[in-house]
Image: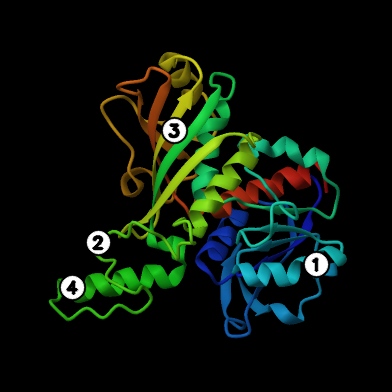
């Protein structure tokens, strides 16, 4: 990485945007100039970067022809409204919102399908899948030579940070009110989330599936390169600030070789396998870390072709911001 690049981070004042800026510094990303952009309401704030305070500017006045790459850590509507403008300016884009359709922005997890970039041309329009898919793909990718996966069933317990900074603030406020014996008045959520659990995240469609559940199903198939794979996903919102927990069942065509799977996970980059008799949690293990933690690895009780495991991962750092930075590192090393 001998070259330096001018880069923009859109949504720099959000939870993911701030973490993205931190990672660019931590990983010594080859930057010439870093432009921090946000809404008009957030413009004028500043963020620390390499010993300086960089001022955040308004997105609507920015000229994308002045940068080679832009990270969009914003809402879906903003990503959709700016994608064509960014491409026309000759700037590559990495979207973290999930707002761009798969045919417009390939979902990439470098550990799983980074080689797919070879089929594309600049300016690139790429996307991070949901943090749940990013974590699961990191675990399943090193097992593809050992498994002939027929079906994947997962329950994703999502922290409130999956709903943005407002979700984190709401959980903190509700918890304080309940602990101080004050009447609870839900604001951001439509009901109590503190000491509670929602068996549904967001609105459900006519078939009863949430948008996030549909997104997991579609993105996992794309990232693993298995369009015919059967995937079932249930998302739950839990009263945890940061970090997602997944319970995963993989149905294989043949009997599971648990020793071979264990060995593959122990040697997998970006994966930390917790030993038998222990299990990973988001607060004790995953939050603030760059690894995906895996535990409770076991075969099914009734079916030797089933393997079951648990995953804990930092949804903001690993699942979103780090995945985006790793995509960018791959781009500038081989393609830009």
Label 3 neighbourhood size at 10 Å, few (<14), some (14-19), many (20+)? Answer: many
The residue where tag 4 is placed is: 178
Using the rendered image of the protein, determine whether residue 4 is visible from the camera's viewpoint: yes
Foreground: disc 4 or disc 2: 2
Element type where label 2 sits in the image: loop
Element type where label 4 sits in the image: helix
- The spot of residue 153 in percent (x, y) is 44, 38
Between the C-alphas of marks 2 and 3, the distance is: 29 Å
The circle on residue 334 is: none
- The image quadrant that residue 333 belongs to is top right
Q: Residue at x 73, y 80 (%)?
A: 60
Element type where label 1 sits in the image: helix
Between the C-alphas of marks 4 and 2, the distance is: 12 Å
Q: Is residue 181 left or right of residue 267?
A: left
Between the C-alphas of marks 3 and 4, the distance is: 36 Å
The residue where tag 3 is placed is: 272
The residue where tag 1 is placed is: 84
Q: Which of disc 4 and disc 3 is earlier in sequence?
A: 4
Foreground: disc 3 or disc 1: 1
Between the C-alphas of marks 3 and 1, the distance is: 39 Å
The residue where tag 2 is placed is: 196
Foreground: disc 2 or disc 3: 2
Q: Which of disc 2 and disc 4 is earlier in sequence?
A: 4
């Amino acid at each position: 990485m001998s070259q330096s690049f001018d880069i923009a981070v859109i949504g720099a004042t959000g939870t993911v945007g701030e973490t993205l800026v931190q990672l660019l510094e931590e990983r010594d990303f080859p930057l010439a100039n870093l432009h921090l952009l946000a809404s008009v309401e957030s413009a004028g704030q500043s963020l620390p970067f390499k010993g300086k305070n960089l001022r955040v500017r308004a997105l609507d006045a920015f000229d994308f022809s002045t940068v080679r790459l832009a990270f969009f850590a914003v809402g879906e509507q903003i990503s959709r409204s700016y994608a064509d403008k960014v491409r026309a300016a000759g700037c590559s884009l990495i979207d973290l919102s999930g707002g761009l359709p798969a045919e417009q922005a390939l979902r990439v997890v470098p550990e799983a399908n980074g080689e797919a970039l070879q089929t594309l041309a600049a300016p690139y329009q790429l996307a991070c899948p949901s943090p749940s898919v990013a974590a699961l793909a990191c675990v399943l990718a090193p097992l593809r030579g050992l498994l002939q996966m027929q079906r994947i069933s997962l329950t994703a317990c999502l922290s409130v940070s999956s709903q943005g900074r407002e979700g984190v603030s709401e959980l903190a406020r509700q918890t304080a009110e309940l602990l101080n014996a004050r009447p609870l008045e839900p604001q951001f959520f439509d009901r109590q989330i503190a000491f509670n659990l929602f068996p549904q995240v967001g609105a459900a469609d006519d078939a009863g599936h949430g948008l996030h559940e549909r997104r997991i199903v579609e993105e996992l198939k794309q990232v693993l390169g298995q369009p015919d794979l059967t995937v079932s996903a249930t998302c739950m919102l839990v009263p945890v600030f940061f970090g997602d927990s997944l319970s995963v069942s993989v149905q294989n065509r043949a009997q599971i070789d648990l020793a071979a799977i264990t060995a593959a996970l122990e040697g997998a980059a970006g994966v930390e396998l917790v030993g038998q008799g222990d299990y990973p949690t988001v607060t004790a293990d995953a939050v603030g870390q760059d690894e995906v933690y895996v535990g409770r690895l076991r075969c099914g009780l009734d079916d030797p072709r089933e393997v079951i495991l648990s995953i804990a991962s930092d949804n903001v750092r690993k699942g979103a911001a780090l995945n985006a930075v790793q995509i960018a590192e791959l781009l500038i090393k081989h393609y830009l």
